[in-house]
Amino acid sequence: MIKTDILIIGAGPTGLFTVFEAGLLKLKCHLIDALPQPGGQCSEIYPKKPIYDIPAFPEVLAGDLVDNLMEQIKPFEPGFTLGERADTIEEQEDGTFIVTTNRGTKHQAPVVAIAGGLGSFEPRKPPISNIAEYEDNGVAYIIRDPEIYRDQRVVIAGGGDSALDWSIFLADVASEVTLVHRRNEFRGALDSVEKVAELSKLGKINLITEAEIVGIQGEGKVEYVTIKHKTEGEFQQETDNFIPLFGLLPKLGPIADWGLEIEKNAIKVNNALDYQTNREGIYAIGDVNTYPGKLKLILCGFHEATLMCQSAYQRINPGKKFVMKYTTVGGVEGFDGSKKEAKKEVVKSIKEF
């Protein structure tokens, strides 16, 4: 039996940052994740994809963000159960929970924080009858390493942020980038739409709208795709790679059977207070939760984790008052007694102030 203060389901960015915030409160954390390494989608799906909305980072690769988070939580020595899926949860008479994985590993904690992102997922595939024949032979639904496409021809299909962002990124990597979308309007960020339009004018992206990919041809690997245009009809285009980016189909998996209130495949929480679910002691933070005005952003997950940990502290230490100290004054103290002192001049200036 693995015992801890806060059991975190999901080792993505939100789950990892929870370790830091809990550590400041002297609470120990253990994380469970079905993936074989920490980082969630940032590590598994797009480690080389740049992220632009992390405070103080004008641009950071998803994989580097995970590395930085892992470095940040080192002093607090979290435990990990990786490559195992959280399957069942049982509430004990003392109010603690026992969570068992699909491999039988048991974990006990008074607080459970579900930070499972979108849950388990599978890509949305276009309705092309022979597409499975070319999977891993020119067809990919996820870009893990953009260097694979160095000096190659790439056709991307989609109209959301992922299709736009990767078209922009690969414009400087691939020898030819074609973006195909069935409408003239895109669903992604306006800034990305404008960048694609500009790159199209410069001839760095071949932009085809009001069209869709309806066929794939090639001997053992992708050599052509058939594009069906609204007014120009069908035509073939040579390419080395076809990447349909239509998003992912999220699934909560066994968590959906934990007696939690679910709305549109997300867990409802009380955002007015502490992101607790309808079951006391079980919280949901990050992309896995929903509430009025919810935004599925990493930085929002960080905020939710911070408030959740304050509530968890009160549940674990009823009646005990916690006095918050800014890290610029108190530093970061790990469970091994080590402490990263704030710079003396900073402390001195604050005291003088």
Image: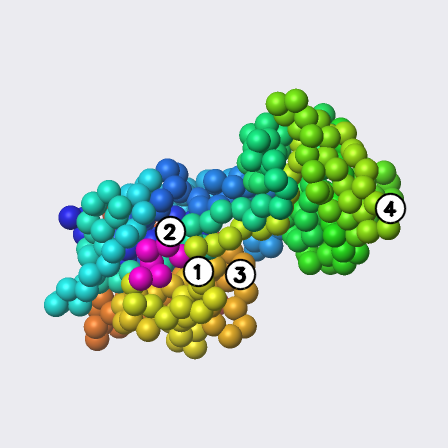
Mark 2 vs 3, N-terminal side? 2
Confirm or deny contact between disc 1 and disc 2 (CB under 8 A). Answer: yes
Give the residue displayed 61% in from the left and 40% down from the top.
Answer: 129
Q: Is residue 255 magenta?
A: yes
Q: Which residue is mark 4?
A: 232
Real-space CA distance between mark 1 and mark 4, rounded to the nearest whole angstrom: 42 Å
Q: Which residue is mark 2?
A: 10
Real-space CA distance between mark 2 and mark 3, rounded to the nearest whole angstrom: 16 Å
Task: Tell me residue 96's x, y (percent).
Answer: 18, 63
Amino acid on which the number 2 mark rests in the picture: Gly
Nearer the observer: mark 1 or 4; the answer is: 4
Badge 4 element? loop
Badge 2 element? loop
The main secondary structure of the magenta stretch is: helix
Give the residue displayed 33% in from the left and 40% down from the top.
Answer: 83
Mark 1 vs 4, N-terminal side? 4
Identify the magenta region: 252-257
Q: Is residue 233 magenta?
A: no
